[in-house]
Image (cartoon, helix red, strand yellow):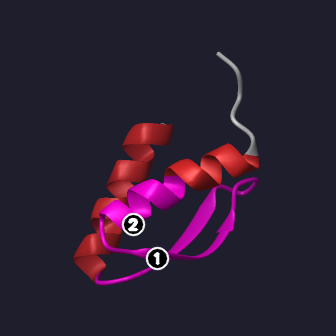
């Protein structure tokens, strides 16, 4: 399987985040850090969905 580039990762993450009612505040894919904005329960759901998709 081909490794995804940063633009592809951002598109995937952005789609997941928007689906769960959050916004991306900042990200660093090298350090695997994504800061989200939104209600606490939505952020938790976003994080779980991102982990499920990206592993």
Residue at the top extreme, as displayed:
1
Q: Give me the residue at 75% from left, 41% from top.
A: 5
Q: Give me the residue at 66% from left, 44% from top.
A: 8
Left or right? Give the position of 21 relative to 2. Answer: left
| The quadrant where residue 41 appears | bottom left
| The quadrant where residue 19 appears | bottom left
User: Pointer 2 and pointer 1: residues touching (CB < 8 Å)?
Assistant: yes
Residues packed near mark 2 inside 10 Å, few (<14), some (14 to 19) or many (20 plus): few
Q: Residue 35 in the image: x percent, y percent?
A: 55, 74
Q: Give me the residue at 51% from left, 60% from top.
A: 14
Q: CA distance from mark 2 to mark 1?
A: 6 Å
Q: Residue 39 in the image: x percent, y percent?
A: 29, 84
The stretch of residues the image draws in magenta is 13-39
Residue under label 2: 18
Secondary structure at numbered mark 1: strand
Residue under label 1: 23
Residue 32 or residue 36, whichever sits in front: 36
Residue 50 or residue 19, whichever sits in front: 19
Q: Residue 46 in the image: x percent, y percent?
A: 35, 62
Left or right? Give the position of 35 relative to 40. Answer: right
């Amino acid at each position: 399987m081909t490794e995804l580039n940063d633009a592809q990762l951002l598109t995937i993450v952005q789609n997941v985040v928007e689906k769960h009612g959050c916004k991306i505040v900042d990200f660093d894919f090298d350090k695997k850090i994504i800061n989200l904005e939104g209600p606490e329960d939505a952020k938790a759901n976003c994080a779980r969905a991102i982990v499920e998709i990206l592993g």
